[in-house]
Image (spheres, helix red, strand yellow):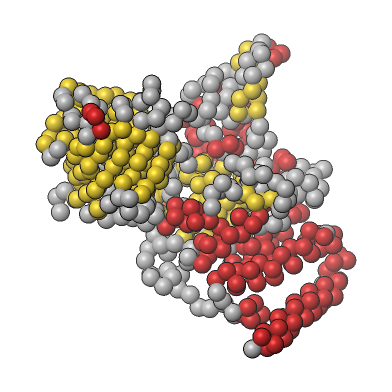
Amino acid sequence: MHNFNLKMIKIILVILVASAVVNMIGGISILKKNDYYFRPSYLTMQWDYWKTKAAYARYSGGNILDLFSSEEPAVSRFGKSGEEAVSIPVLLYHGVIKDSNWQPDEVNVRMDDFREQLFALKKAGWQTISLEDYSDFTQGKINLPEKSFLLTFDDGRTDSYYPVDPVLRALDYSAVMFVISNRSLSEEKEMGHFHLSQDELEHMLASGRWEMGSHTYDGHGFVPTNADGIQGHFLSSRMWLEAEKRLETEEEYKARIGGDMSASKKDLEKKLGIKAFSFAYPFGDFGETVENFPESRGSVIDEARNVFDLSFCQTASGDFPANYREGSFLAKRVNVNSLLSAKELLHILESNKDKPVLYEDYFFQNSGWISGWGTFQMENGAMTIGNTPADESGLAFLNGSYLWKDYKAAANIKLVKNGKVSLAARYHDGNNYMSCDYSNGSVSLTEKINKNLVSENVLLMDTGLSGGREAEVGVEVSGDKISCYLNGKEVVSGAVNENLSKGGISFKIWNPTERDSAVVVRELKVSPIGE
């Protein structure tokens, strides 16, 4: 048996080498006509494709002889389960680094980690979709399989094409590249540098595995925001006009950023012959980090909407990591790098499946909780959320609960040290929710809409949370009413903001003075109302 396997390996190697030689000889006429195929990077991609095919066969437990089969197994568009997606996650990558000496950062990903992440998704049944599929799904025009996702890359970098394309080809995946058009499509741009050239983009499009979107014309950078030369993001900052010793007016600002977006769209469509209907905000900033023009948040989105049909940003730390059938112009993306393991990435996507409102959790394993910030631990039947020296608060929310509407939730909690703990309902993200807040001496109802926080109906009382004692806290939302419970009794109630017709649950601990506070949560039970 051992000799047979050794012979098979030798035969496969001979076939691989022969195949490569035949392809090279057979394509010699093409090679002479197009410099692209002479490039060592192109030949490396062919070799990487076969290596990736073999690696995935080993990873998935398949037969390595299937590498030479030209037929793909017939698979239903809706997979084995036939279930439909209720939301679509979008993944964001930047550079894919092959250098073995490279140290992981929060932007790029190591090649081995990238391959393992996509291998894990493929083996679990996840499939890529197109931009048009994504847009049609969120507008309610089509249904998609449950395990569908959109794969995107920013900046138009050579190191997010050459290492990546063999993996896409081997896994039958597709992706979107958001291009900074002036850096890739200028007349003097040649192949082989940091940004992809027009010729390279054209070959990507011809493969059928890549689509293109805009990442501005020349707006992926900074502009001066005052006389001292302080820099701010191009799209979200009003620019300091040194010659006139003033900031540009709001009208000038809108004309500048709108002009850049229009130039990008025109460049992509004219030079690549595509319909450029999607846009990705550089740095994920659509007015979130500006210092000299708070109104830019609305202006950036408005100007983008005037030019494009769809736009993409990054998820904030407390956001649900997928997009729903809401027809939103602004799509959220999960930023993926080498700090996120393949197992963690798969957990994020798998746990996003819509959960029934009749839900119980005893915290022996993580069924979908995501830590927004602070510390997070789940073991021995308890979920512990804490703050840190860097964060005055800690938060975790239940992935897959976004579509919940009318329900009642109750949990046993214990407050470690002082501070406040909240149980939120109709939770959209870290800046939009209703919550019941508990401290040693009070219960209050809080509304947070677009970062604006309002606490109301404060009731001073002994909650029983002092000294590390355990208490049952609860929240009930039905229509436009919300009620807070303590040990089974309603203690505070109020009206739900009209912007929060649905949303999930979260727990939060905060203490500005003591940065080692925590809340321990046990035995969560959620039940629907009115069914």
Outermost residue toward the left in this view: 489
Q: Position of residue 112 (x, y in %)?
A: 64, 57
Q: Residue at x 57, y 24 (%)?
A: 237
Q: Position of residue 513 (x, y in %)?
A: 38, 21
Query: Left or right: where does residue 340 sit relative to residue 467?
Result: right
Position of 388 with respect to 447 (left or right) is right
| Quarter of the image that includes the N terminus | bottom right
Front residue (pair 137, 410): 410
Residue 440 sits above or below residue 66 on the image: above
In the displayed orientation, state which residue is furthest to the top.
245
In the image, taking residue 110 as reference, residue 192 lies left or right, namely: right
The quarter of the displayed image where residue 78 is located: bottom left
Q: How many marks?
A: 0
Write down the quadrant of residue 141 in the picture: bottom left
Quadrant for the C terminus in the image:
bottom left
- Residue found at x 41% / y 73%: 80
Question: Can the viewer see residue 109?
Answer: yes
Question: From the viewer's perspective, is 74 left or right of 483?
Answer: right
Judging depth in this view, the residue of 103 and 31 nearest the camera is 103
**Residue closest to the eye, 513 or 53:** 513
Give the image location of residue 150, x and y in percent: 52, 55
Q: Is residue 427 visible?
A: no
Q: Name which residue lies at 69% across and 54% down.
A: 161
Q: Quarter-wise, where is residue 195 in the image?
A: top right
Can you give x and y, in whole percent of width and height, for residue 13 in the image? 75, 78
The answer to whether residue 16 is above or below residue 265 is below
Q: Residue at x 73, y 51 (%)?
A: 99
Q: Is 28 located above or below residue 387 in the figure?
A: below
Q: Residue furthest right?
A: 32
